[in-house]
Image (spheres, rainbow, N blue to C red):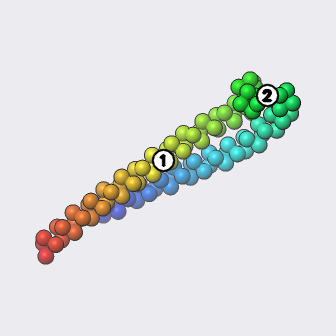
Amino acid sequence: ADITRSTDELEDALYKAHDYAFRCGQQLTRAQVDINVEYERGGKADGLSFEDFLWRSRSIIADIYQEKEKTVSMSLDRLFEAYEDCRRGEVAVQTDLTSLKMEYLEAA
């Protein structure tokens, strides 16, 4: 029961981290569409690179885009941490199963 509860908790955390990263990616995609329109109208015509345009822009759209980029980066870090927790949990489960098998064989 303890093994299944811990694996369920790890799996749930991984699912939630994946879902959050996916939603953040969708939000970034929408923000990217808006900032690309703004860049095409202003920055590109002025000969600015996209990065220079973002750095110089005082637009709320640019601020939102940069914030969404940071959020996606953090969500991917969380997803990687959840994945690593699952990998460590998998090793712990294998250790627990081996221990249980040994106890069963000794008792038999």
Q: Position of residue 93 (x, y in %)?
A: 31, 60
Q: Secondary structure at mark 1?
A: helix
Residue that appears at 64% across and 34% down: 67
Q: Earlier in the sequence, mark 1 or mark 2?
A: 2
Instruction: Say which of marks 1 and 2 sits in front.
Output: 2
Quarter occupied by residue 45: top right
Quarter occupied by residue 39: top right
Mark 2 Cα shell of 10 Å, populated few (<14), some (14-19), many (≥20): some
Q: Are marks 1 and 2 in contact (CB under 8 Å)?
A: no
- Left or right of 21? Residue 44 is right
Q: Position of residue 85 (x, y in %)?
A: 40, 50
Examine the rendering and report whether any part of residue 59 can be seen: no
- Camera-side residue of 47 and 103: 47
Task: Please tell me whether residue 37 is drawn above or below residue 90 in the rendered image.
Answer: above
Quadrant the C terminus occupies: bottom left
Q: CA distance from mark 1 to mark 2?
A: 34 Å
Residue that appears at 42% across and 50% down: 84
- Left or right of 14? Residue 33 is right
Residue that appears at 84% across and 36% down: 40
Task: Please tell me whether residue 36 is drawn above or below residue 101 in the rendered image.
Answer: above
Examine the rendering and report whether any part of residue 68 can be seen: yes
For label 2, the residue is 48
- Left or right of 6? Residue 60 is right
Quarter occupied by residue 48: top right
Disc 1 residue type (three-letter): Phe
Q: Position of residue 50 (x, y in %)?
A: 75, 33
Q: Position of residue 66 (x, y in %)?
A: 66, 33
Disc 2 residue type (three-letter): Leu
Specify the label residue 80 is tagged with: 1
